[in-house]
Image (cartoon, grey):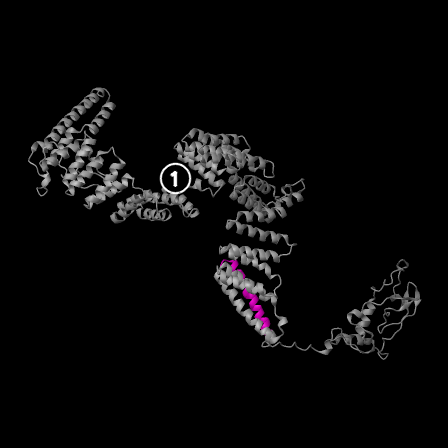
Amino acid sequence: MMQNVHLDPETDEDDLYSGYNDYSPIYIEELENDAAFQQAVRTSHGRRPPITAKIPSTAVTRPIATGYGSKTSLASSIGRPVIGAIQDGVTRPMTAVRAAGFTKAGLRGSAFDPLGQSRGPAPPLEVKKKDSPEEKIKQLEKEVNELVEESCIANSCGDLKLALEKAKDAGRKERVLVRQREQATTPENINLDLSYSVLFNLAGQYSVNEMYAEALNTYQVIVKNKMFSNAGILKVNMGNIYLKQINYSKAIKFYRMALDQVPSVNKQMRIKIMQNIGVTFIQAGQYSDAINSYEHIMSMAPNLKAGYNLTICYFAVGDREKMKKAFQKLIAVPLEIDEDKYISPSDDPHTNLVTESIKNDHLRQMECERKAMAEKYIMTSAKLIAPVIETSFAAGYDWCVEVVKASQYVELADDLEMKKAVTYLKQRDYNQGVKIFKMLEKKDSRVKSTAATNLSALYYMGKDFAHASSYADIAVNSDRYNPAALTNKGNTVFANGDYEKAAEFYKEALRNDSSCTEALYNIGLTYEKLNRLDEALDCFLKLHAILRNSAEVLYQIANIYELKENLSQAIERLRQVVSVVPTDPQVLAKLGELYDREGDKSQAFQYYCESYRYFPCNIEVVEWLGAYYIDTQFWEKAIQYFERASLIQPTQVKWQLIVASCFRRSGNYQKALDTYKDTHRKFPESVECLRFLVRLCTNLGLKDAQEYARKLKRLEKMKEIREQHIKSGRDGSGGSRGKREGSASSDSDQNCSASSKGERLSAKLRTLPGTNEPYESSSNNEIDASYVDPLGPQIERPKTAAKKRIEEDDFADEELGDDLLPE
């Protein structure tokens, strides 16, 4: 038996549990033969029969030998030593079996059931009644909360109408909920927070839907309820509503009431309410009261908006010294932005990674927006007060520049200098503006590029393309990513006719800044010059998607469609232009021209009349309208337009001759004769005027006919002699060289057409109209041979669609015909 007992080594005297994990295979055989153990294993809940001495071959006591000596100890039914036995006076500790539910009762025959499974399953939970008042109240409260949430979500999505409907539904259900709570429980159990949120949301939705009366009533319900704590602050919202209604006195009253409700420890809220009071005073025109509010704010908690508004108030009252002080206070407002934290101080990879991660986070974006807002306020204030704080705007800008240089906004000093130069340009003092730009050209790259860009634009507008190109090069070299500089460079190349190269500069500008609309517009013009109409149309359509109401872009689209001979689309685009700028006479005239080409005379007449109404000095419009009335034989209407044309072009004889012709066509021969005589006094060398005078005086039987006939013969003879001299001189000088000969013959054909004219005149004389027009018939052959009959058939000439030919005009003479007929 002792060979199955393991002795502890002497080195493990301090380990009380050594050797307990060692066992002999004989134990396993004994467990297999132990009927009590096997019975315990087979039972479902681990029950085992009580230990008795009747079980054979189990109660065998064996001596246990330990490192402390051989001692007799208690043994279990299978011969294993009992845990916690006393060996050599040392009591072994018990194992933690009580926590598992083991008690001594198990030794006395009780079953081991730590989970209480022998007691059977737990009774089922009681089903709550859905019809109970408590359940109904909880369900209704849940529905109210959901409606409030849906209302807020709809408001954030921009669906204000749905948000208001949800808020109203929440209000109705909340009232039902209050009544049910009052019936079921005591009034103290009413959920005040839910009632407050429902009313507050309803008032807000009324306000955003511009239902101000309902919103004010709802706010009054909240404010007057003593059970709502801190509800007085909502008077700020009521003041905002009165401000929207332009009821400044009530707005200030409620702002001040809300200010009294806010404790002094809440400084930020008090400052915001005082800012509202200042804004209300400014809109009411009470600048002195607004100054008091903003001065208090700047003394307690300075901020950018208050400083900017204070500067505006002092500008409104015209106090120069206070304007300067307010500007200095605005400059002194701390930005509270630490730029050093975005610069890595070492080469530590972890530090660099952290720095890169925060360079464009939300906090950094907020700081950039705050800085941009501060710069905008400072630049606007300086631009506002600079012309009035000193004797001249230049001195005022100089003072502002000195103040800015001594502040934390040093980089704005150059921008103020730029503003000063632009102000010089607006006052048409170009020399001073150019001088400042040239001075700024010597600054750093950013300012240098901007100054050179402005200089390039100035020289370009002055048609000095050489200097414009050189300064554009300087701007591009200083900042290759400046889209304005690239656009100006493209403009100078465009002016020199190199359209392909200009397109490259415009494309580079667009690559650097896709929102550069100038470059996109110019590249469209470049493609139009290159006759790449489809690409030009794509550019202008893209630009139209960006600038929806740009009249220039719409006009260019219409022009492209016209070049592509798509007149319907061109008319549609021009009508859009008219909807944007309804008083542009050129666009109206162009629209009338397109309708005339389409053959729609009524629409063309309407738009030409509109163009004439806005700009009655366009000779082409005046000529078209006069020709339209001649075509429709409204001679009196045509007279007023051609009289306007004679005032616009007083050196042109044709307008007065047409006026006289209209008088004669209408049957007013005396007025026609007076007009011809007046025209002859103004233009004594007009052969056509003398011809009409001879014919009209002859038909009327006046004695002046012979005198006008003599003048006509003398003038025609002088004219022929002059033409012969010119022709002979050209023939003598141009006979040696073929090129000059061709040129001389061309000039001769243009200026000396006596022979061809005679042939045309004789042809027209053979086709005189009948005697039904008495003033046309004449038996004086000498007179008939010396003039062209005004009502004879005319030679058809090509004409454009923009203007109408005056049919059956008085002036069929070939030499003057091209001037008299609208082209």
Residue toward you, 423 or 687: 423
Residue 227 location, x and y as percent? 61, 66
Q: Which secondary structure dominates the residues rendered in magenta?
A: helix
- What residue is drawn where x is 42% and y is 30%? 465
> For residue 191, what is the image quadrant?
bottom right
- What residue is drawn where x is 22% and y is 34%? 653
- Looking at the rendered image, the quarter that the N terminus falls into is bottom right
Residue toward you, 276 or 484: 276
Name above or below for residue 799 compared with residue 125: above
Q: Which residue lies furthest to the bottom in this view?
A: 54
Q: Give, as a three-letter code, the residue at label 1.
A: Leu
- Looking at the rendered image, the quarter that the C terminus falls into is top left
Residue 252 location, x and y as percent? 55, 55
- Kindly tell me whether residue 279 is visible in this rendering: yes
Residue 88 location, x and y as percent? 93, 66
* Magenta residue span: 135-158
> For residue 77, what is the image quadrant?
bottom right
Residue at the disc numbered 1: 525
Magenta highlight on residue 13 = no
Name above or below for residue 196 compared with residue 489: below
Residue toward you, 17 or 783: 783
Residue 353 location, x and y as percent? 64, 44
Is residue 491 found left or right of 336 in the rendered image? left
- What residue is drawn where x is 26% and y is 35%? 649
Is residue 453 found left or right of 688 in the rendered image? right
Magenta highlight on residue 151 = yes
Residue toward you, 531 or 699: 699
Query: How dense is the environment of label 1, judged by Cα within 10 Å: few (below 14), some, or many (20 and up)?
Result: many
